[in-house]
Amino acid sequence: TISMARALEILDELAGIDADYIPACVEYVDVCYALGYFKKAIPVYEKFVDLPGISSKHLEKYATVLYFSQEYQKSLDEIQKVLQTDPNNFIMRRLEFYNHYDLGHTETALELGAKFTASKGEKDEYIKQDYISYAKLLNKNKQGLEAVVYYRKALELDSTEVELYKEIASAYEKAENYVEAIAAQQQYMERIEEPKASEYYSFGRTYYQAGTQMGVNGDTIAQKEYLLKADSLFAIVTEKNNDSYLGYIWRARSLASLDPELIDALAKPLYEQTLEILLQDADVDKRKKELTECYMYLGNYYYLNKDKENTLVNFNKVLELNPTNLEMKKVVEELYK
């Protein structure tokens, strides 16, 4: 048997003998199509695609070749020729949607995507990319919850697309539905071999947001549950990446939210560890906000514990970082009296 690559070599030789021999051109593009040599096929298609009597199958293939060669507008032109005689052509409707999506024609792509994903013939089958493309388009246009439906449809077709759980979580986060975001992130974490520090960090942030939301809503039991879980996830971040301040400061924030009156000063050692790491960076201005947060917490802790000396040390640090903070300036002046 002859390999496809060898067949292409033979056809190259034929094309060299008579570049305008249409039967050879047709065979040539069919082999190119089968091998995925799309760009190689385009100039040969151009020799016969406009001839009278060209089959719709070759027009479909030509439109497909143009799409995969990123010739989106040309692909659309060929698609319209097919749809004029076959308006329900499933493959061409798919490519019409894809082309407008890749051209950035948002409104048209949204309209075509909605129609395409809503109707198909009995023998037609959706592929995961149909749902993923439409979901991404919806998400990009602030229709995240609608996008979730299609991300889930894509997962039904291919459960190995675990990254889609992150997209689902992100959509729920944007909608401030942190409980569902947590569920989606949990599904993602369960399906990957070894989560990275950044993934534990992201998961922790979602739990923190959920806890904060529960606090605002007055559900203190759920607030405590979510914030403690956030703390445990940020603790993993510190274990995996102990030279980064991020895990420590977010542990501090989680614990500070559980103890806003500083009764147990749960966050104090975490803010101290955060400071230790931040001060190793010579460029203090880069982390002014985080340093200010640490010094403010520690200053308040010492003030509540009637330690005037250490209160002034920390509040003066806040002033050094924020010399225009008039409120802090007044506080410091009062402490010196």
Image: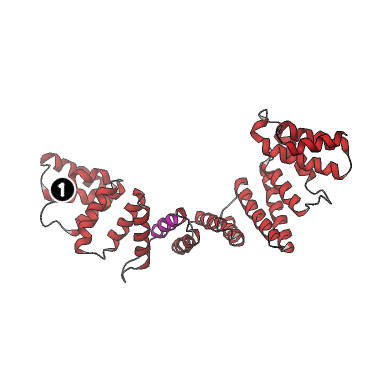
Indicate whether 285 appears above or below 162.
above
**Residue 181 falls left or right of residue 44:** right
Q: Is residue 137 magenta?
A: yes
- Residue range in magenta is 124-138
Q: Amino acid at mark 1?
A: Cys
Q: Nearer the viewer, residue 305 or 329?
A: 329
- Outermost residue on the top side: it is 282
Residue 150 image-quadrant placement? bottom left
In percent of width and height, residue 170 lies at: 54, 54
Q: Secondary structure at mark 1?
A: helix
Q: How many discs appear?
A: 1
Indicate whether 271 appears above or below 49.
above
In the rendered image, which residue does mark 1 sit on?
25
In percent of width and height, residue 141 lies at: 45, 54
Task: Look at 32% across and 59% down and name the residue there.
Answer: 94
Indicate whether 137 appears above or below 280.
below
Q: Is residue 272 magenta?
A: no
In percent of width and height, residue 222 lies at: 71, 62
Graded by Cα atoms within 10 Å as few (under 14), some (14 to 19) or many (20 or more), the crowding at tag 1 reads: many
In percent of width and height, residue 98 lies at: 34, 54
